[in-house]
Amino acid sequence: MIHAGVQMTNWGLVDLLSIRRGIWSSRMNRLRGMGLKLCIFIPVVFLSVAAFGGTSSILEMSPPISGLTLANLRDTFEEFHNGHRHEAIDIMEPSGTPVRAVVPGTIQKLFFSVPGGNTIYQFDEVGEYCYYYAHLERYAEGLHEEMSVQPGDIIGFVGSTGNADERAPHLHFAIFALGPEKRWSRGMAVNPYPGLVAAVKRVK
Ligand SMILES: [Zn+2]
C-alpha cells in the first residue's frame, strides 16, 4: 500500500487527502448511530488510517531546494545508475546551493559513504520515513545528529562528493520507508518524484 500510495500522480495525492477527510467526517456521522455499526466501523477506520496514513509526511513535503520548478525534476527512480536501480531523484544545482529539510523531524545520521559522499539521513516526526540527502559539499554549520529540524531549514549544501561527477554537482534525494526497526541504514526505497512534484506545485 505504501508503494502504491506514493506512486500516485499529483491528482492521486489530492484524492488521497479528500479520502482522508471523508473517512473522518463519516466517522463523526456514524458515531452518532453507535451500536453494532461501531463494531464494524472501528476496524474499517483503523485499517484505512493504517493504509493511507503511511503517506503522511510525504504529503507534507516542502521542496529541498528554494525556487525548484517542475523543469528541474525528472523521474529517474527506475533508471539504472552504476549497475543498480537508482531509487532516488537527482536535482541538478550549482555547488553551494543550500539544501533544506523537506519535513519536520530529526537529523538521525550524518554519514560519509564512498558512493554518497557527505550524506544526511533525516527521520520524519513519527519515524515512518527517512529522507536522504547525498553528495553534499558540506553540512550546515552546527548541524548534528539528534537535532530537530523544520521544513525549509538549511541542512547542507549541494556538491559532488562521493561518486558524483564534479562537473555535474547535484542533490541525490531519496525516501525510505523505515519499517518497525526504524534503522537509518535499513529502509525500503519509495519514489520521491510524486511528492516532489506536489511540493513544487504547493509553493506556487
Ligand atoms: Zn542519484
Image (tube, rainbow, N blue to C red):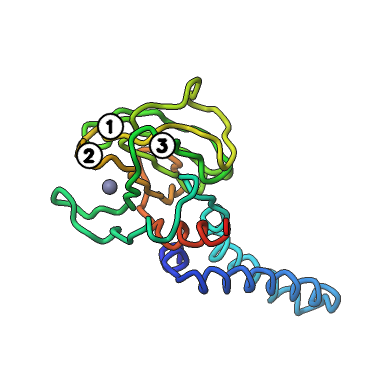
Q: Please tell me how crowded label 2 is: few (under 14), some (14-19), or many (20+) other residues with Cα within 10 Å.
A: some
Disc 2 to disc 3, C-alpha distance:
16 Å
Secondary structure found at label 1: strand
Left or right? Give the position of 100 relative to 135.
right
Residue 172, x across and y down, in percent: 33, 45
Q: Looking at the image, which residue sits at the far left? A: 83
* Camera-side residue of 7 and 173: 173
Spatial CA span between label 2 and label 1: 8 Å
Q: Residue at x 83, y 75 (%)?
A: 34
Give the number of the mark in front: 2 or 1: 2
Q: Which residue is mark 1?
A: 117
Q: Amino acid at mark 1?
A: Gly
Kind of residue sitting beneath label 3: Thr
Q: Please give the residue where the numbered disc 3 appears in the rendered image.
A: 97
- For badge 2, the amino acid type reads Ala
State which quadrant residue 77 falls in. Answer: bottom left
Q: Secondary structure at mark 2?
A: loop
Instruction: State which quarter of the image contains the N terminus.
Output: bottom left
Q: Position of residue 86 (x, y in %)?
A: 25, 53
Nearer to us: label 1 or label 3: 3
For mark 2, what is the residue?
164
Spot occupied by residue 60 in the image (x, y as percentages of width and height): 57, 54
Quarter containing the C terminus: bottom right
Residue at image position (35%, 49%) is 91
Above/below status of 140 relative to 193:
above
Q: Secondary structure at mark 3?
A: loop
- Residue at position x 22%, y 59% in the image: 79
